[in-house]
Image (cartoon, helix red, strand yellow):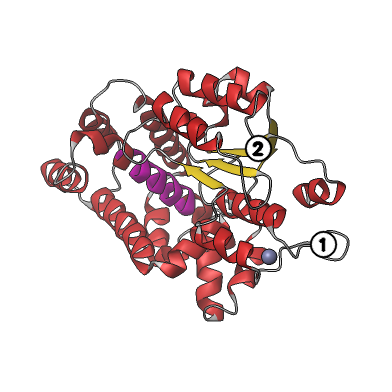
Amino acid sequence: MYLQKCIKSGKIFHAYIFAGSEGLGKTTVARLFFQTLACKLFNPTIASFPCNTCKVCQQMQSGSHPDLYWLAPVHSPFLLLDDIQSLRSRLSKRAFFSGITFVGIEKAHLLTPEASSALLKLIEEPVTRLCCIFLTSAYAALPETLRSRTHVIFFHPVSQSLISDSLRDRCSHKQALELAQESFGRPGFALQALATPELRKNLHTLVAHFLKVLHTKKLAARLTMLEALFFRGISTQHTRARFQEICEVWSFVLRDIFFVKLDQKKYLRFPTFVEQYNNFAAQITSRHLLQMMQDTIRITQAMKTNITPQLLLEQFFLQHSFS
Ligand SMILES: [Zn+2]
């Protein structure tokens, strides 16, 4: 792997961008990379991974290592200049363990332009030896200045067989296969779903709900069901994020039904619903299904504008139904 080559050759860059969808393992790899660089017993000529037993490894794993910093937009929707300035003042104290300071920045696309410039300055005129990793699921949204001055590594989806193989000693064979299928190339999602069964349950609820709304013929009943899904108990601030999550699930359901029509069931993301899919596939033409898929993409994109989510959804369900 590329990063192992960097470590072996001793050629470590000041700053990397790890880019790719959520759940592809960017954070896990970043943590492992930092730990490998810090591990006191790691010998690149005989091993590819850190020892996992020394004190430094344990501190890196628990996040308590004094030279390790993680920045994430927790209290504010953006990473602000203040966060970077406080990091700068903390870094002015010399790193005392590994001689290198590790900085991980999650959701780097949420950095304000000022914070991004301050960070670049920090990287280019370091007060200590730095290794900084910017993690993002929206590479194109990063400022050009950041993209051109860092080393970019793209993360790609992982094969289903690789994900299911890696899960086999943690759960049953059947569950490993299901999780691999539902994770859709994202090992991080599979692991999270294994640790938090609620995650999978919620996804299945969304799939079942979408199928139910599509199946309901009376328009008034449909709109009431939609309203319950999107707007009850959700603040306006979270409506759009929730909407995008739901639209993504809808896109996968429509895609699944399309693959059922093509008799390609091995490609389904939610094979649990194959019986309902069969039912819908028999009632709808491929052309109508493609139109629905295109409309789902269109409304997801329209979400980025100021159009009210409710209007977009109503329009979708006025246009499309199974009868
Ligand atoms: Zn170690």
Given residues 200 and 15, the one toward you in this image is 15
Of label 2 and label 1, which has the lower sequence position? Answer: 1
Mark 2 belongs to which amino acid? Leu
Q: Is residue 206 above or below residue 92?
A: below
For residue 129: magenta?
no
- Specify whether 212 is left or right of 108: left
Residue annotated with mark 2: 130
Quadrant in the rendering for residue 131: top right
Residue annotated with mark 1: 43
Quadrant in the rendering for residue 56: bottom right
Mark 1 belongs to which amino acid? Asn
**Residue 17 spot, x, y in % from top left:** 63, 35
Ligand 1 position by quadrant:
bottom right
Seen at 39% across and 48% down, the residue is: 249
Q: Is residue 296 above or below residue 177?
A: above
Crowding near pointer 2: few (<14 within 10 Å), some, many (20+)? many
